[in-house]
Amino acid sequence: MPMFSLDSLITLIPAILIAITFHEYAHGKVAALLGDPTPARHGRLTLNPMAHLDPLGTLMLLVARFGWAKPVPVNPFFFRGDRRRGMLLVGLAGPLMNLVLAYLAAFGLKLVVGQSLLWQNFFKELLFINLALAVFNLIPLPPLDGSKILANLLPAESAVSLMRLEAYGPIILLVLLATGLLSRIITPTVLFLLQLILVMVGL
């Protein structure tokens, strides 16, 4: 029996591409607005999904409904003003973009309720994928966005200690996934945000 039906892939794949692409574009755009040319130089200031896909992270989104994209390279030495504040804003940009997309997806779902089943399924996938991507990336574990946000809120010494975990971050994430702890962390928050957004749009 196939893991995915054709109908589910038709709606899931575009939802994943949109969520990943806008997430990474938001990181790059904020960095560029702060004066950093690095994202553009690496071809990442684009809405072309192929520039942002990480094979393993995309597979995780397909299978587990949470995952990651290829990180946008950023050089805070180009930032105008406070560099730590700049990195905080860059780190926040991706998850915030996903929350905006989740709200828009919920609004789109409201518009098609009782109409095309294909569009209903697409907006449901877009809503859930964006919420899962936002929540997953806010986990304060390197190399996820949450670690960059937390590192730039902590005192400098504590931030250095946190970023030393970066070499072990993927291993820790795999352990959390294998033990089911990752789902226990992500799922309640996603469901809370889902209910909140549905209430906000009147569904």
Image: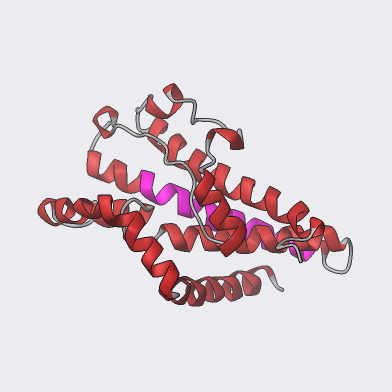
Foreground of the two, 78 or 145: 145
Q: Main secondary structure of the magenta part?
A: helix
**Residue 108 in the figure: left or right of residue 48:** right
Q: Residue furthest left?
A: 157
Q: Quadrant of the C terminus?
A: bottom right
Picture quadrant of residue 102: bottom right
Whole-percent x, y for residue 197 in the image: 60, 69
Q: Is residue 91 above or below residue 195?
A: above
Residue 46 in view, yes or no:
yes
Q: Nearer the viewer, residue 118 or 104?
A: 118
Above/below status of 34 relative to 110: above
Examine the rendering and report whether any part of residue 47 can be seen. no
Name the residue at the front extreme.
1
Residue 164 placement, left or right of 89: left
Specify the color scheme: secondary structure
Residue at position x 57%, y 52% from top?
59
Where residue 76 sits in the image (x, y, percent)? Answer: 27, 34
Q: Measured from the top left, where is residue 169 in percent x and y? A: 31, 56
Left or right: where does residue 27 sit relative to residue 88?
right
Q: Is residue 105 above or below residue 82?
A: below
- Exactly how many numbered labels are in the figure? 0
In the picture provided, is 174 more to the left or to the right than 163?
Answer: right
Q: Residue at x 65, y 56 (%)?
A: 104
User: Which residue is at 56% across, 44% downward?
Assistant: 22
**Residue extending farthest right:** 115
Question: Which span is picked out in magenta?
Answer: 90-111
Q: Residue at x 20, y 56 (%)?
A: 162
Task: Check if residue 106 falls in the magenta segment.
Answer: yes
User: Is residue 94 part of the magenta span, yes or no?
Assistant: yes
Instruction: Work out which quarter of the rendered image holds the N terminus and state it.
Output: bottom right
- Pinpoint residue 21: horizontal percent, then vertical percent: 57, 42
Closer to us: 21 or 8: 8
